[in-house]
């Protein structure tokens, strides 16, 4: 079996697995073409950029598509349509997989990384444009020039990727700004023992659930508060101008309820008691 045959069969197998469980309605999935390419891309290995990327979206499937699916294949692109289930009947929903050559895209693979290997919410207008373009293309395909179709598919991929990327980057920027606002509030009120997620959420006029989403990449809100308190304590303990301050006073200035709690937390995080840390830092100056 030649390389082209292997690639074709691999794409067919991927399409067979592109069911409703993988691609939810209203979302776009962008992935590398082929399991080995995906692993290289995820691992950041040299030469990890895949030759092709696949755009998968669940949307209305034209009634002309058979239950077994439909495929249009060109040298640098391919279009696969697979009904999700027969219960939808003709013209029901299915998965559309558009495969394009990475080299033909004006976007680099690095620029596409925010979209890769995760469901990305797609605006309803973009879904409608994508589904309409596919429907019209299938209806007219027998009368169209194959090279023209290939260029059209590449342009459609560009439209979807650029629109989804803009939305995703805008969303990430909003999340980043809200996260910075939360951290600034925590730092300002760090000395207050009653500082908690509820107070932070109320101050930012967001729900606690939304606040938790901003800190879902580590120890959460409480973990970030604790880490910032320990960092402030380290700065105070290592400051010669604060050498006369007692451990209890520093604990209070950092928002810990008492010196014992402060010492336990500090030692757990830093690996030394506050006094040991201070002696070591001041002795090294």
Image (tube, rainbow, N blue to C red):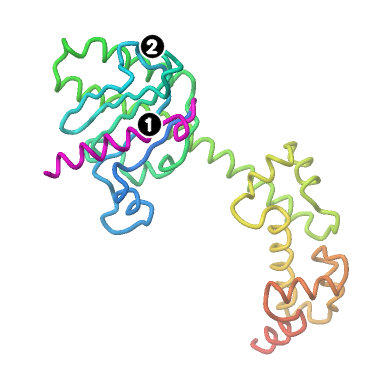
* Residue name at image x 34 percent, y 33 percent: 16
Residue 236 locus on image (x, y percent): 74, 73
Residue 268 locus on image (x, y percent): 71, 74
Q: Does 254 sit left or right of 215 as displayed?
A: right
* Residue name at image x 48 percent, y 32 percent: 167
Based on the displayed image, in which of its 4 quarters is residue 141 positioned?
Answer: top left
Question: Where 51 sits versus 20, above or below?
Answer: below
Q: Which residues are magenta?
A: 1-26
Residue 112 locus on image (x, y percent): 37, 41
Secondary structure at badge 2 equals: loop
Q: Does 215 sit left or right of 243 as displayed?
A: left
Question: Where 214 sits versus 81, above or below?
Answer: below
Verify whether residue 6 appears in magenta: yes
* Residue name at image x 31 percent, y 16 percent: 65
Label whose residue precedes the other's in the sequence (2 or 1): 1
Q: CA distance from mark 2 to mark 1?
A: 20 Å
Tell me the crowding category of disc 2: few under 14, some 14 to 19, or many 20 or more residues within 10 angstroms, Cα based: some
From the image, state whether disc 2 or disc 1 is nearer to you. Answer: 2
Secondary structure at badge 1 equals: strand
Residue 90's disc number? 2
* Residue name at image x 46 percent, y 41 percent: 118
Tell me the crowding category of disc 1: few under 14, some 14 to 19, or many 20 or more residues within 10 angstroms, Cα based: many
**What residue did someone put label 1 on?**
56
The quarter of the rendered structure image containing the C terminus is bottom right
């Amino acid at each position: 079996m030649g390389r082209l045959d292997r690639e074709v069969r691999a794409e067919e197998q991927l399409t067979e697995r592109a069911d409703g469980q993988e691609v939810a309605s209203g979302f776009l999935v962008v992935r590398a073409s082929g399991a080995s390419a995906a692993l290289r891309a995820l691992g950041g290995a040299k030469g990890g950029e895949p030759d092709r990327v696949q755009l998968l979206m669940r949307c209305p499937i034209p009634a002309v598509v058979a239950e077994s699916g439909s495929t249009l294949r060109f040298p640098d692109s391919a279009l696969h349509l697979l009904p999700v289930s027969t219960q939808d009947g003709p013209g029901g929903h299915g998965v559309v997989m558009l495969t394009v050559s990475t080299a033909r895209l004006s976007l680099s693979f690095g620029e596409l990384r925010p979209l890769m290997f995760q469901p990305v919410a797609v605006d309803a207008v973009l879904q409608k444009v994508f589904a309409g373009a596919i429907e019209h293309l299938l209806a007219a395909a027998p009368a169209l020039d194959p090279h023209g179709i290939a260029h059209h598919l590449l342009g459609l991929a560009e439209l979807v990727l650029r629109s989804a990327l803009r939305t995703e980057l805008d969303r990430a920027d909003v999340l980043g700004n809200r996260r910075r606002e939360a951290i600034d509030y925590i730092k300002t009120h760090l000395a207050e023992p009653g500082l908690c997620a509820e107070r932070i959420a109320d101050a930012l006029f967001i729900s606690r659930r939304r606040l938790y989403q901003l800190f879902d990449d580590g120890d959460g809100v409480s973990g970030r508060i604790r880490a910032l308190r320990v960092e402030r304590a380290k700065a105070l303990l290592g400051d010669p101008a604060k050498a006369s301050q007692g451990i209890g006073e520093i604990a209070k200035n950092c928002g810990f309820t008492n010196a014992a709690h402060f010492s336990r937390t500090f030692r757990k995080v830093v690996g030394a008691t506050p006094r040991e840390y201070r002696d070591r830092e001041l002795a090294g100056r």
